[in-house]
Image (cartoon, rainbow, N blue to C red):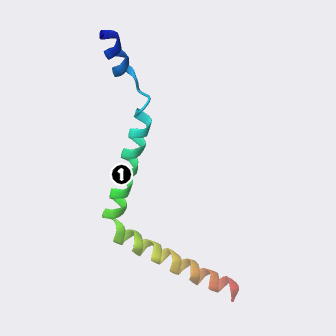
Amino acid sequence: MKNKIRKILADNSGMGTVEIILIIVVLIGLVLIFKNQIRELTGIIFQKISADSSAILA
């Protein structure tokens, strides 16, 4: 009985999946918190890209 409990406690096969899920949850939370800032930043970046590409093509 003690050996079975020790084997169960020593088994780490599911740890990778749990860690990946926690990382994904944290990333989604950060995206939700900083959603407006991310939109503004990407808008500015795409405006600069389109302005620079227009200057190159002209």
Identify the residue at image location x=39%, y=45%.
Answer: 21
Where is 18 relative to 12, above or below? below
Image coordinates for residue 7, horizontal then vertical, percent: 37, 17
Left or right: 48 as drawn, with respect to 30: right
**Three-letter amino acid code of the residue under disc 1:** Val
The residue furthest right is 57
The residue closer to the viewer here, 16 or 45, is 16
The residue furthest top is 2
- The image quarter containing residue 13 is top left
Count of numbered badges drawn on the protein? 1
Q: Residues within 10 Å of mark 1 (few under 14, many from 20)?
A: few
Quadrant housing the C terminus: bottom right
Left or right: 55 as drawn, with respect to 39: right
Identify the residue at image location x=41%, y=73%.
Answer: 39
Identify the residue at image location x=43%, y=72%.
Answer: 41
The residue identified by callout 1 is 25
The residue closer to the viewer here, 58 or 4, is 4
Image coordinates for residue 9, horizontal then vertical, percent: 33, 21
Where is 38 relative to 16, above or below? below
The residue furthest bottom is 58
Quadrant housing the N terminus: top left
The residue furthest front is 1
Image coordinates for residue 5, horizontal then vertical, percent: 31, 16
Q: Secondary structure at mark 1?
A: helix
Identify the residue at image location x=42%, y=43%.
Answer: 20
